[in-house]
Amino acid sequence: MDNYLGPQKIIEKKKEFLFPCSQHFYKNPPQIVRGEMQYLYDSEGKKYLDFFAGVSVMNCGHCNPEILEASINQMKTLQHTTTIYLTQPIVDLAEKLSQILPGAIKHSFFCSTGSEANEGALLLARLYTGKNDFIALNNSLHGRTYLTMSTTAIPMWRADPSLSDCVSFVSNTYSKDKNLEDAANESLNTVQRVIKSKGAETIAALIAEPIQGNGGIITPPYWYFKRLKDLLESYEILLIIDEVQTGFARTGKMFAIENYDVVPDIMTVAKALGNGMPISAFCTNDKIAASFTKPSASTLGGNPVSASTAIAVLDYIEKHNLCNHAEKLGKKLYSELIRLQKKYPNIYDVRGIGLMVGAELLKENGEPASEETDFILEELKDRGILLGKNGLGRNVLAFQPPLVITEKDVDFLIDELDRAFSRVY
């Protein structure tokens, strides 16, 4: 048998050698040692249905053999050189991305993380517009670097006590006091008010996630981004769309913004593009890309192994029609959660698109049911299912599985979720 440390020893080593900010789910966490498509296995040999996908990373499944083959073959021939030398995978990937990116978006700058991609997108907006400030939405999460953390509105992810004051936050499309339509209209109104108060001549861009993942799977109505884009264009302000968590078939489209029939000025991607291999990019059209002329590079961004892996990911998504699969199973998941909502009124709201769905839990007094959410996650873990949680109150169950799950997997999840809810309510 493999000589695994075990959960307790890993926790001890984390406390001794990592930072205290490095936390984990569960009171009794397993040690995960192996992955196989939609399943994970712990050090005791227990099998789990993964319904979080490493936070929307493993869209094509864990240790997918078709993708691993491309990674390993590239690793055996050329692993790294940096972008100052000519290699083929990075340009092949850029070309392949240009064929699936929305509208006239064509150029990509490759990095390693979503934070880097969003930082680069914000820089690009400043270079192109010559303006300094930004607008971001409440509940947003855009990264851990200085500027991306400054555009992040979730208090628990704003670690730096001295963040930039160049960002103005506006209402998102969620409010417990308003319906979705009214909340979305209020969001647009607050954008307009900020533009008028700050001055359009100072604002380079608005950055937004098409669906706010960590913010609670906040899902705007389908008309929202068209009206937002029109509003921004009237003031010559760019729209940056952060697809780090929503991209690559998760919502039934290659990119979530396509559900809203809008082409952003700049778009960022990461996470699922590498299916576990670190890679990200900020992407834009000819005109905006032409403004980035000063020398810049990412030492590891788009290296041959990551780029070859990403090409295999895009091939796999197309070959196995994961967009349609996510749309179909997403509708099934959503309808089953609505059925549970009728049974358990503490499920306040079910929202999302495709296989990015959230279920918000509230107490009888309207407060976030954070403890109940943790209990349900623990129950599901014990029953062989790993689920996520998010939202400002950490009270939103997050359903973001690998896109290779089956209808039987959804049925298994719903049955066990029903049992877990019955122990709480």
Image (tube, grey):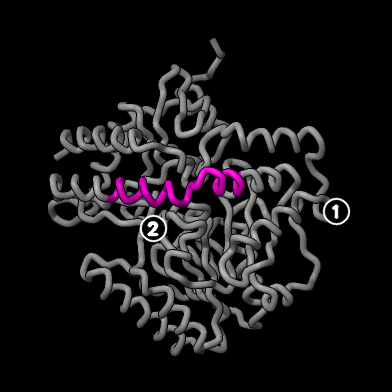
Q: Secondary structure at mark 2?
A: loop
Amino acid found under the numbered disc labelled 1: Leu
Residue range of the region highlighted in magenta in the rendering: 313-334
Residue 160 can be seen, yes or no: no
- Residue 325 falls inside the magenta stretch: yes
Assign the C terminus to one quadrant of the image. Answer: top left
Q: Is residue 95 left or right of residue 9?
A: right
Residue 85 drawn at (x, y percent)? 86, 53
Q: Is residue 398 left or right of residue 95?
A: left
- Residue 362 falls inside the magenta stretch: no
Q: Residues within 10 Å of mark 2 (few under 14, many from 20)?
A: many
What numbered label is drawn on residue 150?
none
Residue position marked by numbered label 2 in the rendering: 215
Residue position marked by numbered label 1 in the rendering: 86
Amino acid found under the numbered disc labelled 2: Gly
- Locate residue 192: give its quadrant: bottom left
- 391 over 151 or under it: above or below: above
Query: Residue placed at 48% from the left, 28% from the top?
Result: 11
Residue 327 drawn at (x, y percent)? 39, 52
Q: Residues within 10 Å of mark 1 (few under 14, many from 20)?
A: few
Give 386 or 96, whichever is nearer the viewer.
96
Q: Is residue 301 left or right of residue 85?
A: left
Residue 6 drawn at (x, y percent)? 48, 20
Residue 300 drawn at (x, y percent)? 73, 49
Query: Residue placed at 37% from the left, 79% from the top?
Result: 188
Give 136 or 221, whichever is nearer the viewer.
221
Assign the N terminus to one quadrant of the image. Answer: top right
Q: Is residue 93 left or right of residue 46?
A: right
Query: Residue placed at 35% from the left, 67% from the top?
Result: 220
